[in-house]
Amino acid sequence: MPGKQATGCVFCQIAAGTLPGDVIWADERVVAFLDARPVFKGHTLVVPRPHVATFAALSVEALAPLFTAVQRVSRAVESGLQADGTFVAMNDKVSQSVPHVHVHVVPRRRKDGLRGFFWPRVRYQDAAEQSDYAARIRAALADS
């Protein structure tokens, strides 16, 4: 059930494998990959494969697979990165930098500096470190 893709949508391209991304997990309906501009290292985006621009446009049939994946990824981010918890959020239209439904799963640690919605951004040292974070979350997903 790959669904329709939007030409030029970066998330559709990552889901299709035509644009590189550190994919954490994927099935026929949902893809999870590391955010290119993470709040904290390990920040993962979970997206439906078919292009859906807004949460309101997401079909009822797509909700369960999307949020089941979000729940699994949240557990894996926490266990794979030894985080104290996760922050799960979704922007819709306003502050939605890519107009494709996506859920943020951000690893949290006590006193990590995240205050409200003023998200500090961090960078991976290099591609190897970014891939390491992806591998750790993938491994935790495989164990779940």
Image (cartoon, rainbow, N blue to C red):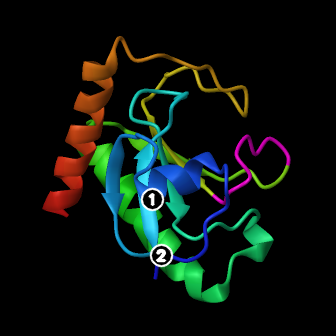
- From the top left corner, tell me how far across and down residue 92 is, in percent: 78, 55
Please state, as top left, top right, bottom left or bottom right, where the C terminus lies in the image: bottom left
Q: Residue furthest top?
A: 125
Q: Is residue 61 left or right of residue 59?
A: left
Q: Is residue 121 left or right of residue 91?
A: left
Name the N-terminal-most of marks 1 and 2: 2
Q: Classify 10 Å Cα crowding around label 1: few (below 14), some (14-19), many (20 and above).
A: some
Real-space Cα distance between discs 1 and 2?
9 Å
Q: Which residue is mark 1?
A: 16
- How many numbered discs? 2
Q: Which mark is residue 2?
A: 2
95 in the magenta segment: yes
Q: Using the image as rendered, state which of residue 74 and residue 1 is in the foreground.
A: 1
Identity of the residue drawn at 23% across and 29% down: 132
Q: Nearer the viewer, residue 22 or 2?
A: 2
Task: Name, please, the residue furthest toward the right.
Answer: 94
Residue type at mark 2: give it: Pro
- Magenta region includes residue 121: no
Number of other residues with Cα within 10 Å of mark 2, as a class: few under 14, some 14 to 19, many 20 or more:
some
Q: Is residue 118 left or right of residue 104?
A: right
- Please, what secondary structure does the residue beneath circle 1 have? helix
Residue 44 in percent (x, y) is at 45, 44
Contact (Cβ within 8 Å) of mark 1 with mark 2 = yes
Describe the element under mark 2 as helix, strand or loop: loop
Residue 91: give its label.
none
User: Residue shown at 40%/53% (left/top)?
Assistant: 17
Residue ID at (47%, 27%): 40
The magenta stretch is 94-101
Q: Quadrant of residue 48?
A: bottom right
In the displayed structure, 86 sits above or below 69; it is above
